[in-house]
Amino acid sequence: MMSAVSVPVLQWDVSQKFLKQPSDNPASPLPVPNPTKSFWLNTPGASPLAKEGSHGPLTTDADICIIGSGITGVSTAYHLAQQLNQVDRPIKTVILEARDFCSGATGRNGGHLIPNFFFDFLKRKLSYGEEEAKKVHAIEKYTETELLKIVKESNIGDTIDLSSGAHLVLFITDKEEENARADYSAAKDAGLDVSEVEWLSKETMQAKYSTSFPGCRHPGHNLWPLKLVTHLFTLASQHNPDKFTLILHTSTPVTAIYPSSSSARPWSLATPRGTVNCSYVIHATNAYASQLLPHMRGPAGIIPTRGHVVTLRAPAPLPQLTNSSWWANEGFEYWFPRPVNTPNEKPLIILGGGREVTVPTFDQYEADDSVFREDVGTVLRDFLPGLFPGKFENSVVPEMEWTGIMGFAKNGDPFVGPVLDPSKTPDAFKGQYIAAGYSGHGMTRTFACGEAVAGMVAAAITKKEWMEPAWLPRHFLTCPRPASA
């Protein structure tokens, strides 16, 4: 039986061209109040912090306000707790979340923690130089290493369903494989460690995985993102409560930021529950950044892009499928089988992608995750049966189906550092910082980007110079070297 692909191929460059086109689309709205139900968020007992701080008095004064409770916002709080350990006064930090805790992209993604070993190396080398291209891979490896260290030290591997094993990339077209091999060679020549990458022929893939496409394999991890972020929040809250206080208010959207009338705090954040005055603001809103920062709309900033995910019950036990995670079709599609309790249990497959059928927009400039497109759902249901004939059943009804809003940047890399508007003076947003725009690949970047922004804020508070981490790509930064005050 021959493999057949249910989605269009070689669409990545087409989607990037649309991403870079001038647009008159308005700034992003606030997150909708009635999103689709995600497996990660809506499994009973999965989110103990879902409604935390949504009722009762609102914190009206803080040193630091973090907008967004996904992995970026909570990682930033975690690093602030670590870096402000020696301050001579207590620091109060507030996280403001428009909906439930971690209910944005982090609570709706594919569950992968997989660093990029070499893909797109040549493109970044051409754009930013070899050393910068190497740093893009360094930050992802750093993020994976640090998160796994926390998981091990906290002994929460089982709690967050950490799965370690092989990650495979399928090459559906010859062009994909040619590009990948060119990236691999360039990365290897530049000194990147690609020793764990193994190239697999069509024959090997057919014999081992029952698919007729060639591929490559390297280590990877999968986990329950919400549960990881919940643990990071707990660590940040308990690290040193006498020096660092962390407060969470869910169901508290920030609708505007303006200069405060108080001389003690420069910024006021308006919410439906009242106003919060603070000295520093950290935008961890990803796709929704332009809602509060209109200059970040369109190709020069961050474009909201809707992703689609389904859970499908596999027709066979896990040993017949392997526990590997996968990417295919230039990374548009991704999937992995969830852990099982018994060898004969048929696993739940988390599968995302399908944006290729939404041409010409590729669901860019879509910020509504309360709906999903039937055409995307249809191709996802038929995707795995096409790649693995006889192993998966066609048109299986998903057990759950949801959407999430990613934040795409035209170069594929995030904005990290002080908020800057080219049309205004450098001090117009003094005290405001951002880490956002991960282009659907945030799990192996957000923790480190949060560390960088936390370091900038900590340096400002302690009146010290911010030291740029060796693993941080300089082209991620909103300015070459952010001021420490």
Image (cartoon, helix red, strand yellow):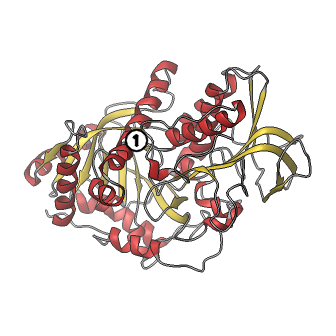
Looking at the rendering, which quadrant does residue 319 occupy?
Answer: top left
Residue drawn at the location 71% of the way across and 59% of the way down: 33
Measured as percent of width and height from the top left, residue 363 is found at: 49, 71
The correct choice, above or below, for 152 with respect to 432 in the image is above
Residue drawn at the location 90% of the way across and 45% of the way down: 263
Query: Looking at the image, which residue sits at the far left?
Result: 203
The correct choice, above or below, for 270 with respect to 46 in the image is below
The correct choice, above or below, for 362 with respect to 408 in the image is below
Badge count: 1
Measured as percent of width and height from the top left, residue 236 is found at: 65, 28
Depth check, front residue: 401 or 285: 285
Looking at the rendering, which quadrant does residue 178 occupy?
Answer: bottom left
Q: Residues within 10 Å of mark 1 (few under 14, many from 20)?
A: many
Residue 88 is left or right of residue 28, and the answer is: right
Residue behind mark 1: 140
Check the picture and name the quadrant holding the N terminus. Answer: bottom left
The amino acid pointed to by label 1 is: Glu
Check the picture and name the quadrant holding the C terminus. Answer: top right
Measured as percent of width and height from the top left, residue 475 is found at: 45, 53
Residue drawn at the location 44% of the way across and 42% of the way down: 444
Residue drawn at the location 44% of the way across and 76% of the way down: 18
Residue 173 is left or right of residue 406, and the answer is: left
Residue 268 is left or right of residue 478, and the answer is: right
Depth check, front residue: 478 or 426: 426
Measured as percent of width and height from the top left, residue 309 is found at: 46, 57
Residue 46 seen: no
